[in-house]
Amino acid sequence: MLFINISSDKVYISTWTKNIFLDRNGIENILWPQLIQLNQKNKIKDILVLNWPWWFTNLRVSTLCINLLNALQKNKIKIYDISKINLYSYLYKQKLIPRYWIIYIWQKKNIRLYDFAKQKYSTQTIQEVNLDEDYFLDQVYEKWYYTNLNSKFGLKIIYHKSWLEITFKSQKIQIKLKDLQLKPLKQIQPNYMIDPKMN
């Protein structure tokens, strides 16, 4: 199975034995050749996509490339789509992660704060958040993005052959893919937290 995380500032591709990180700058030129190369080396039969929410360009380009690859393979690829909101809700219900998720929205100060107990988000600035053990945020590769917070509150996702490994506060959580009960799709759509503005 190929794992693709399109819900970060870098597209993360993993074949379990190989990890690839593609910068969002020029993603429209580098993702497609990368997928073709991987498919030529070993025919892709399954793709697990971690979707929503993040950079609009990453979401648009990645879903287009994945759907195109499947179309060229005559829809023989099984595509499994899971949003971060669903994955983190699953973890929260099992009391494995805190109640509040700080969602980076491409700005240095403004964030979305998701409350898993109430299942809704609010718009705030990072200064308005009183950080404690009830909060977490995604690992982000932007050097300026809350570097000091990533080590203390950051949550990291790595793919293994049959599970996702979530690392939070030095604790490793293994989520078996079969436990997520995902159904294969013919194609996927980019999931936006907020509607993108088209020029």
Image (cartoon, helix red, strand yellow):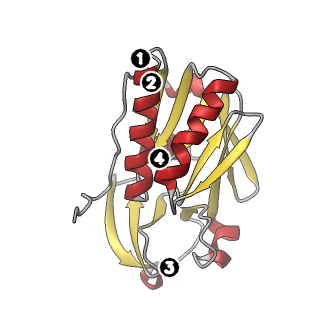
Compared with 157, 162 (above or below) is: above
* Foreground residue among 86 and 77: 77
Instruction: Tell me the CA gap for discs 4 and 2.
Output: 23 Å
Q: Does the CB distance between marks 1 and 2 fall below 8 Å?
A: yes
Q: Quadrant of residue 132?
A: bottom right
- Which residue is pictured at 37% across the width and 33% down the height? 188
State how far apart marks 3 and 2 are (Cα).
45 Å
User: Which residue carries the number 1 mark?
Assistant: 75
Element at badge 3? loop
Task: Work out whether mark 1 precedes mark 4 in sequence or the reverse, and give the earlier one.
Answer: 1
- CA gap between label 3 and label 1 equals 48 Å
Q: Is residue 17 left or right of residue 139?
A: right
SS of the residue under disc 4 = helix
Q: According to the image, label 3 marks what residue?
A: 130
Under mark 4, the amino acid is Lys
Camera-side mark, 3 or 4: 4
Disc marking residue 70: 2
Disc 1 is placed on an element classified as: loop
Q: Which residue has dot 4 on it?
A: 84
What type is the residue that disc 3 sits on? Answer: Asn
Which amino acid type corresponds to the residue marked 1 in the rendered image?
Asn
> Could you say which is closer to the camera, residue 68 or residue 157?
68
Question: Going 48% across and 61% down the picture, which residue do you hit?
Answer: 101
Instruction: From the viewer's perspective, tell me whether residue 167 is left or right of residue 24.
Output: right
